[in-house]
Amino acid sequence: MHALIDFPDPERGRERLAFGRPAQVLVAHRLDEVRPVLEAVERQAARGRWCVGFLRYEAAPAFDAALQTHAGVDPLAWFGVHDHAIDATEAAAAETAVDWRSTWEAARFKAALARIAAAIADGEVYQVNLTAPLQARYDGDPRALFAALQRAQPAGWCAYIDTGREQVLSVSPELFFDRRGARLLGRPMKGTAPRGATPEDDARLAAALLASEKERAENLMIVDLIRNDLSRVAAIGSVAVPRLFHLEPLPSVWQMTSDVVARMRDDATLADVFAALFPCGSVTGAPKVTAMRLIRELEARERGVYCGAVGLVRPGGDATFNVPIRTVSLRDGVATCGIGSGITADSTPAGEWAEWRHKRAFVERAARPFELLETMRMEDGRLPARAAHLQRMAAAARHFGYAWREADAAAALDRLAADHAQGLWLARLTLDRQGRPQATAAPLAEPAGPLRVVLAAHCIEHPSPEFLRFKTTRRESYERFAPRDPAVFDTLLWNEEGEITEFTRGNVALRIDGRWVTPPLRCGLLPGIGRAQCIARHEIVEEAVTRERLPQVQALAFINSARGWLPAVLD
């Protein structure tokens, strides 16, 4: 299979089409070849053929020389021409392993935001979409990685294209444009918030996004830009915004979208549509020309297919293209994936950096297989916190899309308890993607005295907040802080703002001014069962504690549901 299109369809739910080796390939190696390629695509579609392909972001100057980009990787545009679609086969089931690395450090990010803020203050620009690539070595099966990405980011405008030298794996949630007859629809996506760890928290975050003046203004700026762009190919008076500020739930984030529609002029061609709209304003900023000039200044390399367009033109001329965000390109054994956000006058470095981390969650999910995890105390065959742990695992299963049958998980714990009717044990329950539970036990020793703990040498940064909110076997970020001295029980962690968060294996309580406090979840920590029980019994209250306040701490405790409340001493 050389291409797969898996797009939402208003009538059939999903339009899932596979394509074999193309009968013909249409390629633009130079800017002056981009528009002729699109004209050839439209001619092939008029003859009843399918055309599947992409344009790189760096194709933009082909439509307007004022749109500045870096020099693009060859080809600038690529389309496979197919006589017919074939039955879509299931993607490869093999597991993948990818170690993503950011090419930007926080200092460079802050400097770029300062430059954009100055340009906004000077009235040069209203918004700039700043991006940076993640990269990894990948020599595995591209279809397997595409399948993992689809599991991590389902229900979007997904496309797999293999040109021979390069594979494009796009699971974008954003529609660039959809052309059906004379109707043209754009759906820009601007405005982001993380998903919550509980239904109540999730609803709160969604409501906050919808009410946010910053996020609504960011969305409206791009809607206005798209309206102006569409008017260049629209019949007079036909541009409208039937839906504004609509929230779409994705696995790791809430996204705000708006619909802009128009009736195309009779003489407008596919190349005209691209000339009017490309690149999509949601990945440039406004005004587009100035924003793209700043992007070229601040981003050191080309974007490639990321932020370009990926899609298909159907027999007869109807066309659908996504904005290839959440998109991985594989070339010469290197995987590249861009992450970005819209920077406005109200943006802060901490807020935008957090948004980048939320958005990269889809590649972290797909990076390697993981299981959901619960660990609990088992004493003489009894599991005191069993119900709370099963409830938390059920919430994690819903979040990650894992099959969940509570009866199966309960039965696994019942068998474990029957086999360990005497003694004190640490029970471990895991759940794989197919919903298969496995329960094991290890002896649990009670400590003889206060635990010896140490403070982390540097802040912890989780690759994805969802692996912080939910307990899984993806614990690499914690394992980096595991103490090497066998006499040290655990490491006390802190975040980028210098706030105490938790231990690597449990939550923390600190006695300050005669009160026991524990960091709030917003500081970045697992919502532990033992912690929740202590809060419910009014034994501790939530309060942020910075490293600078540690000398004021009168006592320290380690908390989790397996070991309970254990006094600790900070080394």
Image (cartoon, rainbow, N blue to C red):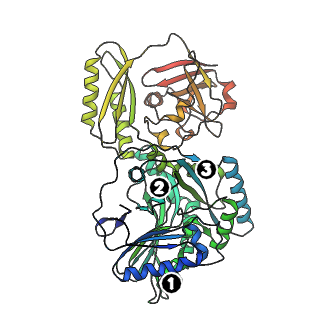
Residue picked out by circle 3: 353
Residue 276 shows in the view: no
Q: Is residue 325 above or below residue 183?
A: above
On the image, the x and y values in percent for residue 98 come to: 49, 44
Residue 391 shows in the view: yes
Mark 1 vs mark 2, foreground winner is: 1
Q: Is residue 161 above or below residue 526?
A: below
Q: Can you tell which mark lies on residue 254? A: 2
Quadrant position of residue 522: top right
Q: Can you tell which mark lies on residue 233? A: 1
Residue ID at (26%, 18%)? 419
Q: Secondary structure at mark 1?
A: loop
**197 lies left or right of 281:** left
Q: How far is mark 1 from mark 2, CA to CA?
A: 31 Å
Callout 2, which amino acid? Trp
- Answer whether labels 3 and 2 touch (C-beta < 8 Å): no
> Which image quarter is the C terminus in?
top right
